[in-house]
Amino acid sequence: MNYINFWRRIMENDVIQKVKIANLDFENPFFDSLRDDYPGFNSWLSRKGGEDAYVLVDNNQLLGFLYLKDEKEADDSIIPSFDMRRRLKIGTFKIDSHGTVLGQRFLSIILRKMLNDGHDFTYVTLFPKQTGLVNLFEKFGFRQWGTKSNGELVYFKDLAVLNDIYKDFPRLSLQCPTKKYLLSIFPQYHTKMFPESQLRTERHHYVEDLSVTNSSEKIYISAARQVLEMRPGDHIVIYRTAERDIPAEFSSVASTICTVSEIRQITDFENFDKFQEYCGKGTIFSQEELEKFWYNQYPKYIIKMLYNVSLNKRIIRRDLRDIVGINAQRWTCVELSDNQFRDILEMGEINESFIIN
């Protein structure tokens, strides 16, 4: 399968939905493996009919299902048991064979909900045979808590700091000495790369983002040579440049916080196929654009980054200059001081749960 075409198609169709379980086709073959693993699964679906689930649909095919439950009571069915603490249970979770890409998509929803809703931790039960999901959860900081009597493993993630940008995701750490940058992105790419629902979030009002673009990993290709100075763990303030015919003072805005995962150059790849494979699962560039970049060897600087959090209040260029104190001739890629970065976090009014101090 061409992953670029697949990824673009699901972005364009916005196929993630939050639906009532009763509206699903319980006999869909997608649920067969769950029926095999959990006796009485159809009865469970019927009992939960009035509750919500997250589903991923593409070309009328059900590709993913996620049910979340808010819990606080003690649970002795888990060894060792859970005491009375507010937690987010990943009740039922299945994705199809496109596991890595779609799994990260669902994990982003789970972990943001845990932080935004103030849960102490989240947890999931998995059979040992589900190695792909076990690896995915471990990559993003889940640790084994214990087991259940049916042989399932219990994995949990709390607010413990693990000093790893993936394991601590979506939180960003201010404890380690890292550099901070402001990175410009054109509006047409910004719209695809970062969810519009977050950009329209009103002050002090959290809107759950269900757009497919709300994934954990992003890839952007820049012409700014300063990108080569970035290192894994550095933080990036995404700066959307001016809209057409509107002064930059008021339409260019800081919108989003990301963390650098890896920096590559287009010349690192021996052929186009390897370049496309690297970029294809996380970039917003089309097949044609990637071919053009490869042919011209420009732009050449590739940033893989984790999308941590969007600012609840966008900061216009005038305030970035006059209040934050950014004074640059070119705003393509600008290094920020620690104080400037903290000012942006404060002015952006992000949920403090997303920050590790």
Image (cartoon, rainbow, N blue to C red):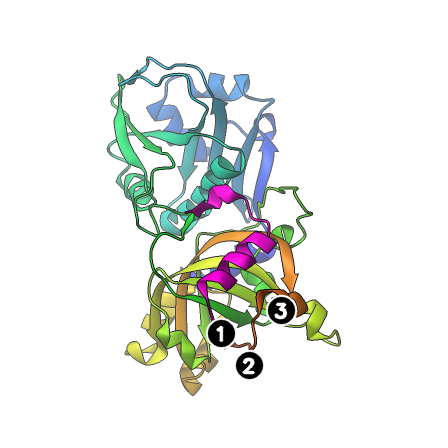
Is mark 2 in CB contact (under 8 Å) with mark 1?
yes
Q: Residue at x 56, y 48 (%)?
A: 350
Q: Residue at x 49, y 25 (%)?
A: 69
Q: Secondary structure at mark 1?
A: strand
Q: Hey, what amino acid is under mark 2? A: Arg
Of the two numbered discs 2 and 3 on the same chain, state the one appearing first in sequence.
Answer: 3
Q: Is residue 166 visible?
A: yes
Q: Where residue 332 sits in the image (x, y, percent)?
A: 53, 77
Q: Where residue 74 sits in the image (x, y, percent)?
A: 39, 14
Query: Can you say whether 252 is above or below 309 in the image?
Result: below
Closer-to-camera residue (334/307): 334
Q: Secondary structure at mark 2?
A: loop
Q: Residue at x 57, y 69 (%)?
A: 325
Of the two numbered discs 1 and 3 on the same chain, state the one appearing first in sequence.
Answer: 3
Closer-to-camera residue (354/141): 354
Query: Can you say whether 13 is above or below 118 in the image?
Result: below
Q: Where residue 279 sits in the image (x, y, percent)?
A: 40, 67
Q: Which stretch appears magenta?
A: 336-357
Q: Residue at x 53, y 36 (%)?
A: 54
Q: Which numbered disc covers residue 187?
A: 3
Q: Hey, what amino acid is under mark 3? A: Pro
Q: Which numbered disc covers residue 330?
A: 2
Disc 2 vs disc 3: which is toward the camera? 2
